[in-house]
Amino acid sequence: MIRASGLVLGALAAFTAYLVAMAPVDSVQGVIQKILYVHVPAAFSAYAGFLTTGVCGALYLWKNDERYDRTAIAAAEVGVLFCTLNIISGPIWAKATWGHWWVWDPRLTVTLLLWFIYLAYLLLRSFTEGSERTARLAAVYGLLGVLAIPLNYFAIELFGGAAMHPDNLERDSLGAGMRAPFAFSVLTGLAAFWHLLMLRQDLEARRLTEALPEADWAAEAGS
Amino acid sequence: MSGAAIAARGLEKRFGRAVALAGLDLDLPAGQGLAVLGPNGAGKTTLLRLVAGLARPSAGSLSIGEQRGHRREMRCLVGYVGHATLLYTALTARQNLVFAARLYGVADPGARADALLEEEGLTAVARRPVGGFSRGMAQRVAIARGLVHDPPVVLLDEPFTGLDRRAAGRLAARLIRLREAGRTLLLVTHDVSQAVPVCDEALVLARGRVAHRSQGPLEALSLERAYEAALETA
Amino acid sequence: MNVFLAVLRKDLLIEWRSRDRVVAMLLFALLVVVVFQFALPGGVTPRTRENAPGLLWVAYVFASLFGLGRAFSLELENDALSGLALAPGDRGWVFLGKLVSTLVILALVQAVTAAAFAVVFELSLLPVAAPLAGVVLLGSLGLSGIGTLFSAVAVGTRFREVMLPLLLLPLLAPVLLGAVRATTALLSGDELPFGALQLLLVTDASYLIISFIAFDFVLDE
């Protein structure tokens, strides 16, 4: 599974890189606009990660199966990774185009908040003793984190500052020749998410089972 | 109220990689007493806390009386006396018992608290904060707390620890009275001699598994030997 | 329901006896007001009055963190937390009992803080006292709802005192936005903005429902 997703990712990445390189340079923004081919997919993957963490946490609480917890931690870490990428690439682009590093518009603010929530999630996990308790408490927090996504959007839409964040995707006003590279870069981003998720999940599984050799139980007398 | 049977199939509790209790089967008829012995870390407290509904089993099933696996309802049927007293030191003995009575929905909590205090011989100190009590006195309040809702099942985790001879004798008599009243008892103890008069069956645990099982009238010597054997494997 | 009342009465009784949480929170809140005075030199200007609602809620958040951090401290001795975990039925009722007892103490502190603010920032709160109390209650429900849950979560971790604010603060954005907006409107003599109320109600309901259900899992071992 991991090898397969790795191969798919490799192929997609290569093809996407080609498309992005070939894509037309934005007449207004210049070459820096191409950073969006990283920024946007990173956002998709980050949200995919956070949703996965929340859902797997809920499933863990319901089914009491630790495999769900493994996916949850993997998704949280990979999600934070992509979110960080998103939060770094955004201001770079913003400074070049709008002239500001940061603006308190809805999407940016919510993404930043989510970043904090999931960092708190990771901190909670590392500060909790006992892997079963960690899984449980983290699942509870992850659930609330996912709930926070729509709540925050609702909140900030109501009161947020000027919505400066471009919503080209919604308005379908992508420049000519950019649709394909964007689509593929999002696909690649999701493929990267999947691959890293699988890798991290596998790492978690191995970490848990290879750790202590199962204690040699003395013979059970009668039963 | 008469006792309730306790049954378990393949009961297991894992804490991450550590297996505290592995695949335990149990069939304790109503009104019987079960002694659970074993070295430290054998899983005795884990078993008790699973039956009390404080922890969720990692695998297997547990039923108390008619309730199968529904921990919310099972907790109504169980009285738990743990290592710690579960008491609030800032509150008086009576207030602690009234709180517990209210928690379990006992009618007329005040009267129930007074009755229990009288049974334990603590009426004189009823309105003193528990913080000032001796270990023995606090233990008695803790036991009263466990019995506040007249549960069909009573769980005790090493209740004789730290008690002087008189207090221990008193406790043993109390437990025998409970058994005679038809309650099901689960007694975790290090001391075989305490178990024998009170219990009908015994379980010796080691490393989370059953090392020895006794049924019928308990015989101190064989139980001691089984316990020693378990200690060696630990 | 019994469980809810039992826990509520017990908490209030202990608090009444020792009064340590209330006094500490009161002192803390008043100190925060004093700190604001120093942090905003130049006296009371229209500008600071504009920011007063926001600052008031900052003070409330600090006071809540203080109070919530101690919500389960009573249960730490003698394993009394297990005593709560043994409660029959849905453990969400234990959560509600704790929540309401915290809110009662918080309400007292909030009232005094508001009075202090009124003095320091020269606000006139009395005409809007009733709706203001309503808004503060809604905001506090959101704050303390998940706050109580996380307080129980933090009890099971190392660095309890640090863990609670870390967990709580990122999730407070919707509550604070709604509460501050509503408070600002009230203090400017406007009508209560419907959007803000809607936000508070939706957030409170979601947070409370999830906390009620999740509490069961948090009390497990």
Image (cartoon, rainbow, N blue to C red):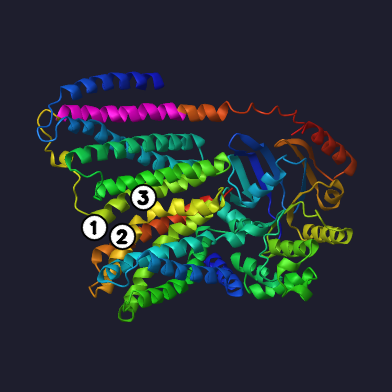
Who is closer to the viewer here, B33 or A217? Answer: A217
Q: Is residue B225 above or below residue B107?
A: above
Judging by the rendered image, the residue that carries numbered circle 2 is C177
State which quadrant residue B96 falls in.
bottom right
Question: Same chain, marks 1 and 2?
Answer: no
Callout 1 amino acid: Leu
Circle 3 sits in a helix, a strand or a loop, which is it? Answer: helix
Judging by the rendered image, the residue that carries numbered circle 1 is A158
Q: Residue furthest front?
A: C42
Give the number of marks.
3
Residue A58 in view, yes or no: no
Output the chain of dot 1: A
Q: Is residue C86 above or below residue C113?
A: above
Output the chain of dot 3: A
For the point 22% across and 37% down, which residue is it? A93
For the point 60% across and 65% down, which residue is it? B103
For the point 32% across and 68% down, which residue is it? C53
Label 1 and label 2: CA atoms lie apart by 9 Å
Callout 3 amino acid: Leu
Q: Horizontal and vertical percent for residue B115?
A: 73, 73
State which quadrant residue B167 falls in.
bottom right
Q: Is residue C89 above or below residue B44?
A: below
Judging by the rendered image, the residue that carries numbered circle 3 is A147
Q: Is residue B175 above or below residue A71?
A: below
